[in-house]
Image: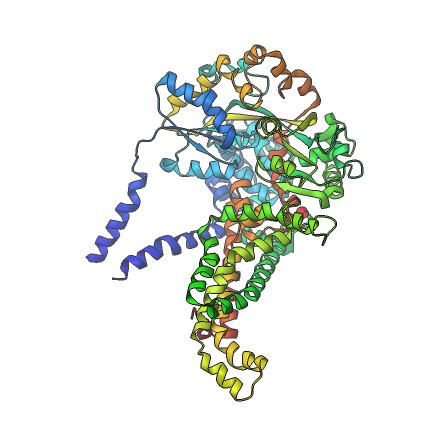
Amino acid sequence: MKKVLHWAALATLTAIPTAGIARDLTVVSWGGIFQDAQRTVFFDPFKAESGLPLAEDSWDGGVGALRSKAEGGDANTWDVIEVEGDELAIGCEEGFLQVLDPAKLGGIEKYLPGTASDCGIPANIYSMVMAYDTKVFTDGPKNWADFWDLKKFPGKRAMRQGPKMNLEFALMADGVPQADVYKVLATPEGVDRAFAKLDELKPSIVWWTSGNQPMQLLGSGEVAMTTTYHTRVGNSNKTDGTQFKLTYDGSMFLVDSWVVMKDSPHLDNAYKLLEFMSRPAVQVKWPEQLGGGVGVTEAQTMLDPALAESLPSAPENVAVSLPLDVPFWIANIDALNTRFAAWSGN
Amino acid sequence: MILPVVIYLFAVFFVPIGGMLGLAVRDDELAEVMPLTVTEIAKWDGAGLPGPTAFEAVARDLTTAANARTAGTPARRLSYDDPALRGVISTTARGLKGEFAEGTDWTTRLPELDPAWGQPAVWTAIDRAAGPYSDFFVLAALDLRRDAAGSLHFAPDESRLYLDVLARTLKIAASVTAICLILALPAAYLLKSVSTGTQGLLMIVLLLPLWTSLLVRSAAWMVILQKNGIINNVLLKIGIIDAPLELVFNRTGVLIALSHILLPYAVLPVLGAMRNVSATQTLAASSLGAGPVRTFFSVYLPQIVPGISAAGLLVFILALGYYITPLLLGGPGDQLLPFYIAFNTTQTVNWGLAAALGSILLLATLLLYGVYVKLVGADRIGLG
């Protein structure tokens, strides 16, 4: 009998956390200065206007993290999340993201072409660029061939760990025209060529994993150049007084999206939040914070011209950058991840 | 009285570990979304192509999956086997447009949607992934593949990874253990020899790192070891080196930081053992004519072996599981197995492989522990 009681007590204990404790609408983003900026522009004004409580969480990406949340059922505490392109596509395909009703969000045509999809609307438009310290190189690198040129620009290079975008950069450094990068990469010879080009630089590469590392590595003089999210460069110059410079030439154009977890108990309020965040009058305040681009067409035209010019979503910057081919990466990420891990580890 | 402890151990130790071992051999993701196909494929003898009923089952399953938006799951599972198959499933699911047309000749319709259905490769992959249990993930964690005929092969060179990683993990853990033991012996001896007051102070110095966050300690080492860091600046100033040493983002950084972090675990058991050795014994040895070397090896060392064993085992097993320190201080070639477990859990979403890697690390650890106990004897491992 005593044993039974113990088991019963244990069962009750383990049952409590899932017994439907009411929680607030929760928005999840990438933390740090990025989420601080979103709080100022989006989250706080939304709370003030709607009177709804809004909780926050942060994450570092990865479809696995989303999937484990989705499989948690009632234990899932996330509702609205900012995700990258592949997480959006895979999450939508695997069915753990809510298919959105465009009518509730102003219609597809409200957004920059190609940035809104079945399960997401654009949250931030940004670029992966190369950056260097003007105190080290007065006449800095102009393109990826320069980034690979260790004679002209001695010193280490920092790049994001993993094959994504680095293979594209390697091919551009090897002389493949921007328009043909994914055509070449789609062939086994193209992948070999990209890895061979990376091989040249391999002894001089320091790999970074988190978005705040590149500016630290560049600032401490550990590396002479780095790949980085463009927003970090302006922010570092503003807050730390550095004199870093970036170039959009050959950069990768990226779109993050807002998505809603399927079976979110706060679906209606999640729509309210998305609708609020996609208003042009709200969006227009976003680039002032960190220099991220806007996904709402009308907001882009309302911006201060000088600021608009410096954004990845400015037409002249779009013209020289390469949009990330999300379907290519979804189809090839597993094989290339494994190959990259084996390549980089030896 | 011990029931709460048993329940606690059961709930937080055996259940999760059992779950991990189970996940490593469970393979039911495909069957969940494509149940009809899995039933039909079981009737296939493996020669040529399966019959029309299998084609129809695939069409039915993928129609349902496309409508429920679950086609991504079988696509992902089959892509572990061959990355090209992800595209085959996605294209077919999209091509079916969510409507199952009765009376269609699926043996010609499916290959129209994607020519891969006319080849045996996709069917054998489905057969292998039919579950509910398989050795697929465990084999993948050992860089092994099973071909259509069922015999084992090593994966092609460019995708061979995990055996190297396992060897690297054991090698780094062994190096850290050796460094820690070499440092721990004099440190423990010093701690034992000084006055009680000094000992207290030294003890705090030794234990302070244990109370500091692991992340902070790793980041601090990054600052100290980097190109323009403290060590390089001092060495450059006093003229010992001409160019900065490369101390971080490589194996050196990982070994330095891991040894520092794990040193207290080595010092304490050795200190305990040293305290148990009576000082009169070494005096007796000297008075009987043994020199300091002989006294150390014949009288002192044998008595502190249990402490050294415990220290070595503790440091070795703890080192096997480090994730954040190698991530911050090492290069891609210095990551331990836990890095790849995390990688497969959050990035590639291959939980079966992550669980298989975890299981292999667990088994390797138990095996080494077993070998060690056999060699040294369980009674020769003690915390003093």
B173 to B219, vertically: above or below: below
- Residue in the image at 48% along x and 24% along y: A38
Name the residue at 74% across, 34% down. A147
Closer to us: B263 or A46: B263
Residue at the bottom extreme, as displayed:
B288
Quarter holding the N terminus of chain A is bottom left
x, y percent for residue A99 = 47, 24
Image spot of residue A253 (x, y percent): 63, 25
Tell me how the rendering is colored.
rainbow
Above or below: residue A162 compared with residue B257: above
| Residue A329 picture quarter | top right
Q: Which x, y percent locates residue B380?
A: 46, 74
Left or right of B130 in this view: B242? right
Nearer to us in this view, B266 or B355: B266
Q: Is residue A154 left or right of residue B162?
A: right
Q: Relative to residue B365, is residue A224 depicted above or below?
A: above
Task: Using the rendered image of the protein, determine whether residue B370 is visible from the camera's viewpoint.
Answer: no
Q: Tell me residue B139's x, y (percent).
A: 57, 54
Q: Residue at x 31, y 58 (%)?
A: B5
Q: Is residue B194 visible?
A: yes
Give the residue at x 63% y 43%: B121
Residue that sits furthest to the left in the current view: A1
Q: Nearer the viewer, residue B86 or A15?
A: A15
